[in-house]
Amino acid sequence: MILRTPHSVCPERVRPPPERRRRKLRPETLRHTNGRSRGLWRVVDVLGGHPPKGSGAALAPDLSGHRTEGGKGVLRLPSFSDLAESGLRPFQRTEVGALFWARVKERPLPAKRGNLMGRRTPLFELHQRLGARMVDFGGWDMPLQYGSQIAEHHAVRRGAGVFDVSHMCIVDLKGARVRSLLLRLLANDIGKLKVPGKALYGCMLTATGGVIDDLIVYLLGESWFRAVVNAGTREKDLAWIRRHAAEFGVEAVERTDLAMLAVQGPEARGKAVALLSAVGSAAALALEPFFGGEIDGWLVARTGYTGEDGFEIMLPGADAERVWKALNSAGVTSCGLGARDTLRLEAGMNLYGSDMDESTHPFESGLAWTVALEPRERAFIGREALEAIRARGPQRKLVGLLLEGRGVLRSHQKVLVPEGGEGEITSGTFSPTLERSIALARVPVAAGASVQVDIRGKLHDAKVVRPPFVRHGKVLVS
Amino acid sequence: MSNVPSDLKYTKTHEWLRTLPDGTVEVGITDHAQHALGDLVFVEVPEAGRTLAAGEPFAVVESVKAASDVYSPIAGEVIAGNPALAAEPEAINSDAYGKGWLMRLRPAAAAAPQLLAPKDYEKLVVEEGS
């Protein structure tokens, strides 16, 4: 067998580059599949002229850890900030990415770190000491699992687990007109946030209604909001936010000083508050779902990505290891991204880049509930496109699938709809709670109660259900 | 450290092969492979009577994370797929060289397999970084 890193939690490290363009460079050159930043950059120009044939291949081994594809060079660089270190300078930023000149001669080589060379969270060394299997995730070296992924999954459904989610990008938005900025940037209505600490989930859209990213925004002060965006879309999001923030005189500051832990499960809150002061503990226990507050110098929020109760805690990176160990001592299980993916899928929560991206709109991504078309005068980016889509009716919808027999549904498997047409699985896995395979799939709106899925050339029956599959430890579908 | 029994033969693609007293062989995936795959949740084994070429995919093992093909180390005819794995795929995780066997095979007469000795497979695992 070929041992490889799983796709669902680990974007492929190297994709074949698009056809080499000889003439005019266009922004699309660096646009990734799905419009998603994978930290993968092609050499599109070398300082002082067009890249000679093979220059990518020449650079790639040094910069990306020995990777070339079909003789074509691919630069794998974890992030924009690492580009500077690598001697690459963007010469043009665009809506969908940036173009680079590679300074072939002056590049200092990044330190070799074995097979992995991604960015690290403050907990990287602890993960290694805990025996985690590390994988590349959106340019970060993250723990996939510490032991059994299924055991980690059950720990969160039945007790408590802790996840390192420090790779997610925390951005503080400050300025007198920050509310106006977010009214424009988010498809959900930031006007719903009236009380400090309240959080809102929503999407940033392109003018055509495509999903740039999904994010959570917390109201922290009258002129201060905090957004948490996906790691894999960090550069794109920051560029997009800053481009619009300038108009509103808003400053967008990435909080790279903070780590983020998700403590999740029915016992999570009880165990987590034991780490707080008496006053802090009472304040944390008083938080309503989807509220956060500054507690003992941390931002503690009753949010998560597992379908269980719990907290997401943003705290100084230097505190993270101590807190993690204290949670372990309190009986909270270390959990990796593998369990995070099966938990979120059972909870019917979308994963950006898999279930939606810039080529899909919220109405066909199960995200209509995050689009606030009222009040009608709120002019958010993507509004006109969404209104037009709504007027003519969306063509596709995102549904849940339960595989009737044995086997495992996986993303990109074809879904045949008896009512006509076909769709595709966007996320699929084995559900440890249901002990059968579940999936999210984008199918024609006409799809009814059952479909067939093509698994390696054989058709398997699957039932169409409405997600979530599991919430708060309870199975909600059958 | 990965478990590599000394009485088996191996492939570069992480299958093991055991020659049984009657001359037939048993095939499975190695401990290193099961560890790398993680919790196995579904296994598709071959039907008896199927003829396999060396290197042909004969089984699919699926973990929570991914589906992987398993390749036949040698040419031959399938005598049996392991029926117990349908209900208990995790047997591969707990006992890769025993209860986790995938198929029994009658080697083709012309089969002259190029297989790895235990020490060579161990070296491969170390090189790949276990």
Image (tube, grey):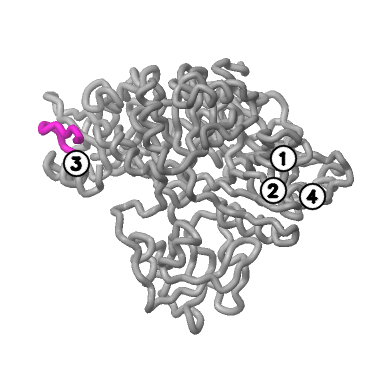
Measured Cα–Cα span from mark 4 to mark 3: 68 Å
Q: Which mark is residue A204?
A: 2
Q: Is residue A460 left or right of residue B31?
A: right
* A188 in relation to A358, above or below: above
- Mark 2: few/some/many CA within 10 Å (<14, 14-19, 20+): many
* A392 in relation to B46, above or below: below
- Mark 4: few/some/many CA within 10 Å (<14, 14-19, 20+): many
Let me know if residue A366 appears in the view. Answer: no
Dot 3 lies on which element? Answer: loop
Chain of residue at mark 2: A
Q: Residue at x 25, y 23 (%)?
A: B95
Select label 1 or label 4 by which is in front. 4
Measured Cα–Cα span from mark 1 to mark 3: 54 Å
Q: Which mark is residue A364?
A: 1
Residue B91 in picture, x, y percent from top left: 31, 21
Confirm whether circles 4 and 2 share one chain. yes
Quadrant of residue B1 within the rendered picture: top left
Dot 1 lies on which element? Answer: helix
Q: Which residues are magenta?
A: B1-10
Select label 2 or label 1 by which is in front. 2
Let me know if residue A386 appears in the view. Answer: yes
Marks 4,2: beta carbons within 8 A: no
* Circle 4 residue: A380
Report the front residue among B26 and B76. B26
Number of numbered callouts drawn: 4
Mark 2 residue type: Met
